[in-house]
Amino acid sequence: MSKKVAIFGLHPARAILEQQPERLVEIFVTRERQDKPLQEIVSLAQRLGVRVQFVPKATLDKKTDGGNHQGILITATAVPPLNEHDLDRLCEEAGARAFFLVLDGVTDPHNLGACLRTADAAGVTAVIVPKDKSASITPIVSKVACGAAETVPFVQVTNLARTLRQLQERQVWVIGTAGEATRTLYNVDMRGAVALVMGAEGDGMRRLTRETCDELIRIPLLGTVSSLNVSVATGVCLYEVVRQRQNS
C-alpha cells in the first residue's frame, strides 16, 4: 500500500490539484471558512471529480496539530525522495544549465521550506540534502514552501562529500559559502553548471563538505550583523546565479 502524507495550506493544496492530481486521496475543508480563495480550490477539486469533505475547524486543528491549515487539508500518496542514483539523470537533463542547491545539515523545517520556495522561483534543478541530521519534507515544510515541496526535485543522499565529487565528475562546479572566504559571490563566475552549498544554521558547512568544494564564496556584510539566516542567504546567492545567467 502506498504511503500517504498530509499536506495543508492553500498554496500546497492548489499545487497538488493543479500539477499532481493523480496523487490525491482525500480533501478536508473547514465549514467555518468559505471565502473566494478556498472556494476556488474546492471548485477545482470538484471539476477533477474529487469529493470534498466539509468538517468543523476543530477537526482540521486536530489533524494538523494546531498548524496554520488555512481551512484545508489533503491527504496524498507520498512521492519517494530521490537519491544519489538520480543525479546522473538530473545532470544529463539540465546539461550546462545544471543548477543545484545543496543544504548541509539545515534542520529547521521553516528554513528548508523557505529554501525550497526560493529554489523553485530561481529555477533550481534539484535540492540536495544529507539523509542524517537534516530536515526532510514534512507538512510544515510543504506549508512554508507554498507548493514548491511538490515541484522541486528533492534528493536525499547518504554521503554528501561523495555526492559532491559525483557532481564534479559531471563537470558541475561546486561552490561553498563561508564567512571567511576571500571572494564574494559577486566576483565569481556562476554561469555554468553549478552546485551552491549552504551550511547549517549557526555551524555552517561541515569540514569535509568545505574541503570538497571547488571554491568558497561569502556574502559581503556591511552592517553590524555577523551572519544571515540560511534561507535569506540562500535567496541572495541563488538570485546572483540567476542575475549572472540572465545577463550572459
Image: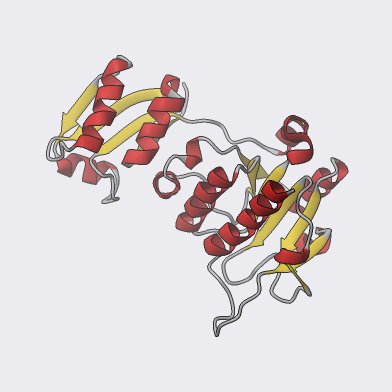
Image quadrant assignment for residue 207: bottom right
| Drawn side of residue 241 relative to residue 189, left or right | left
Residue 165 position in % (x across, y down): 83, 49
Query: Which colour style is shown?
Result: secondary structure
Q: Is residue 178 above or below residue 242?
A: below
**18, above or below 36, in the image:** above
Front-lying residue, 185 or 48: 185
Q: Nearer the viewer, residue 157 or 219?
A: 219
Residue 2: x and y in percent read: 47, 24
The residue depicted at 76 percent of the width and 73 percent of the height is 181
Q: How many marks?
A: 0
Question: Would residue 247 be found to the left or right of residue 56 on screen?
Answer: right
Residue 88 location (% of width, % of height) = 78, 33
Q: Going by the picture, which residue comes out furthest to the bottom?
A: 224
The answer to whether residue 120 of the structure is visible from this angle is yes
- As drawn, the residue found furthest toward the front would be 247
**Residue 229 located left or right of residue 127:** left
Residue found 70% across the figure and 45% down from its top: 99
Residue 235 left/right relative to 61: right
Residue 204 image offset from top left, x and y in percent: 65, 68
- Of residues 61 and 144, the one drawn nearer to the viewer in this rendering: 144
- Identified at 40% across, 44% down, the residue is 139
Is residue 219 positioned above or below 155 on the image? below
Q: Residue at x 13, y 35 (%)?
A: 31
In this rendering, does residue 207 appear at all? no
Q: Is residue 143 above or below residue 237?
A: above
